[in-house]
Amino acid sequence: MASPSFIFSILLLHLLFASLPNRRTLTFAADGSWQLLQKSVGISAMHMQLLRNDRVIMFDRTDFGPSNLLLPNGKCRNDPTDTALQVDCTAHSVEYDVFANKFRALTVQTDVWCSSGAIMPDGNLFQTGGFNDGERRVRVFSPCRTCDWNEIPNGLTAKRWYASNHILPDGRQIIVGGRGQFNYEFIPKNIVANKINLPFLSETNDKGIENNLYPFVFLNFDGNLFIFANNQATLFDYEKNIVVKKYPMIPDDEPRSYPSTGSAVLLPLKNLKASAIEAEVLVCGGAFKGSY
């Protein structure tokens, strides 16, 4: 295969704010004020997602006991496999109306602890995997005033805990990795063998530590996926299941992805008319091996 005609650079940033000589100036660099809108919405916002109707969905793990928000109309979650409460009449998800500054309780049935998800082209939130009874669930939330979570049992081919999702040009989501899963799959499913091996994830797995969970996944302008896990990155053709390019290991060899828990972002593409398009991924933070 011909080498791709673009440049992909990875920027590493250690945020050593305390060492900045002008940190006192930065503290007062902008005017503004804080306003407390709600003392509590009753749950912890382990995950949050802005929807197309300017509502924010928040959801929390279910296996830590009751929340501080009751489900409406005496509704309860009955889950004999839950590790904390088999009958739970409290909410573990809310919809927050930003403009009205109001929230309403939602019913999530299975454990979303360290799950993943993304917004579909139609605006629906597809949320996947999690812990225990949630590891193969697909949960769907459609933006409307009265909608609630709809859960699909065994919606995933593999157990997904600490995986990463990304929307694709054809409207599907790709779900990459997860604990003990060195593979990927698609939702909605449109192939019989919906679990495809990805050796890159086993190559970046530190035995007993992992450091390749919640891999950083970005769709590149050429249709391939940029995947970063642990301290390495690759450009991957998910349609042909081949590695297009391997990038050099980061300079200090230390891990950036979970449980070393750095973060990453694809910076804006500003040179789309150039002969060689340049895309940049900024990777921040991380930890030394074994420090998770």
Image (tube, rainbow, N blue to C red):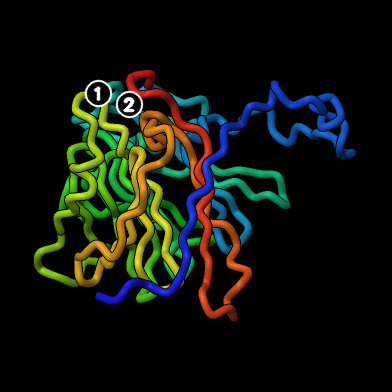
Q: Is residue 260 placed above or below 212 in the rendered structure?
A: above
Along the horizontal axis of the image, is 193 left or right of 218? left
Viewer-side residue, 213 vs 51: 213
Viewer-side residue, 90 vs 114: 114
Find residue 176 and report its horizontal and vertical position in percent.
28, 52
**N-terminal-most mark, 2 or 1:** 2
Find residue 28 and report its horizontal and vertical position in percent.
87, 31
Disc 1 target residue: 83
Label 1: state its secondary structure: loop
Along the horizontal axis of the image, is 250 left or right of 282? left
* Circle 2/circle 1 CB separation < 8 Å: yes
Label 2: state its secondary structure: loop
Identify the residue at horizontal 25%, vertical 54% (top origin).
Answer: 152
Circle 2: is it few (<14), some (14-19), or many (20+) Cα within 10 Å? some
Disc 2 target residue: 63
Identify the residue at horizontal 23%, vertical 36% (top origin).
Answer: 205
Instruction: Give the amino acid at mark 1.
Output: Thr
Marks 2 and 1, Cα distance to the nearest angstrom? 6 Å
Identify the residue at horizontal 48%, vertical 50% (top origin).
Answer: 10
Image quarter in which the C terminus is found: top left
Find residue 29 and report its horizontal and vertical position in percent.
86, 36
Find residue 244 and report its horizontal and vertical position in percent.
28, 65
Instruction: Give the amino acid at mark 2.
Output: Asp
